[in-house]
C-alpha cells in the first residue's frame, strides 16, 4: 500500500471571541518524512475575507498571514499562546460573532497534496468595551 494515502482529519479545539484552535490527526509518524508543510486556510463567510497559516512538521513553528482584524483592545489576553501541541494551529485576531470555514492542506514530500475536512465555526460573542464617562 502507498504510505502517502492517508486521511488528514481536522477538528475544533477551543473557540473564543477572537481565536480558534484547530487540531489535526491521521498523518503517519514521523510527520516530516511525509509532509513538507501544513497550510491552514480560513475564510470568513460574511464577506469572503481569508487568511493562511503555515506550520512545519520539523520545528512545529506556526507562520502566518493572519487577517489581522481585531484591534489590540479586542484581542484575547488568555489565548493558549506559547507552547503549542505539534498537531494544532491557533488562528487568532478573528472577529467576534462571525462564521468561518477552516481546512488544512498537507503538502507532501512526494509532490502531492491532501486536503482535510472543512470545519464550520462561529466565534463567540465578544464583550463590548465600557465607554469612559464624560462630564457634560
Image (spheres, grey):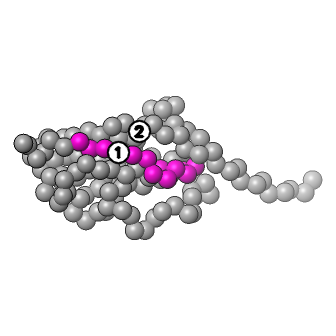
Residue 6 can be seen in this image: yes
Task: Assess disc 2: are there few (<14), some (14-19) or many (≥20) residues with their C-alpha within 10 Å of its C-alpha.
Answer: some
Q: Position of residue 110 (x, y in %)?
A: 9, 46
Residue beneath the point at 76% across and 54% down = 130
Task: Assess disc 1: are there few (<14), some (14-19) or many (≥20) residues with their C-alpha within 10 Å of its C-alpha.
Answer: many
Q: Which sits in the foreground, 68 or 91? A: 91
- Looking at the image, residue 76 sits to the left or right of residue 36; the answer is right
The Cα atoms of the two marked residues, 2 and 1, are separated by: 7 Å
In the rendered image, which quarter is residue 116 located in?
top left
Q: Position of residue 126 (x, y in %)?
A: 64, 48
Residue beneath the point at 37% across and 52% down = 23
Which of marks 1 and 2 precedes in the sequence? 1
Q: Which residue is mark 2?
A: 119
Query: How many marks overall?
Result: 2
Q: Which sits in the foreground, 76 or 34? A: 34
Residue 10: assigned label? 1
Q: Was residue 103 drawn as part of the magenta stretch in this picture?
A: no
Specify start and end residues of the magenta stretch as a single range.
7-20
Q: Was residue 14 drawn as part of the magenta stretch in this picture?
A: yes
In the rendered image, which quarter is residue 123 located in?
top right
Image marks 2 and 1: residues in contact by CB distance under 8 Å: yes
Residue beneath the point at 23% across and 46% down = 106
Amino acid at each position: 500500500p502507498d504510505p502517502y494515502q492517508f486521511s488528514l482529519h481536522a477538528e475544533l479545539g477551543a473557540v473564543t471571541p477572537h481565536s480558534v484552535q484547530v487540531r489535526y490527526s491521521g498523518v503517519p509518524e514521523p510527520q516530516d518524512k511525509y509532509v513538507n508543510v501544513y497550510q491552514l486556510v480560513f475564510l470568513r463567510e460574511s464577506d469572503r475575507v481569508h487568511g493562511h497559516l503555515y506550520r512545519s512538521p520539523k520545528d512545529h513553528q506556526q507562520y502566518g498571514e493572519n487577517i489581522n482584524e481585531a484591534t489590540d483592545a479586542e484581542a484575547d489576553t488568555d489565548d493558549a499562546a506559547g507552547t503549542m501541541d505539534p498537531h494544532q494551529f491557533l488562528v487568532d485576531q478573528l472577529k467576534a460573532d462571525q462564521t468561518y470555514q477552516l481546512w488544512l492542506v498537507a503538502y507532501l514530500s512526494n509532490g502531492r497534496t491532501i486536503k482535510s475536512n472543512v470545519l464550520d465555526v462561529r466565534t463567540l460573542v465578544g464583550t463590548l468595551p465600557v465607554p469612559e464617562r464624560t462630564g457634560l
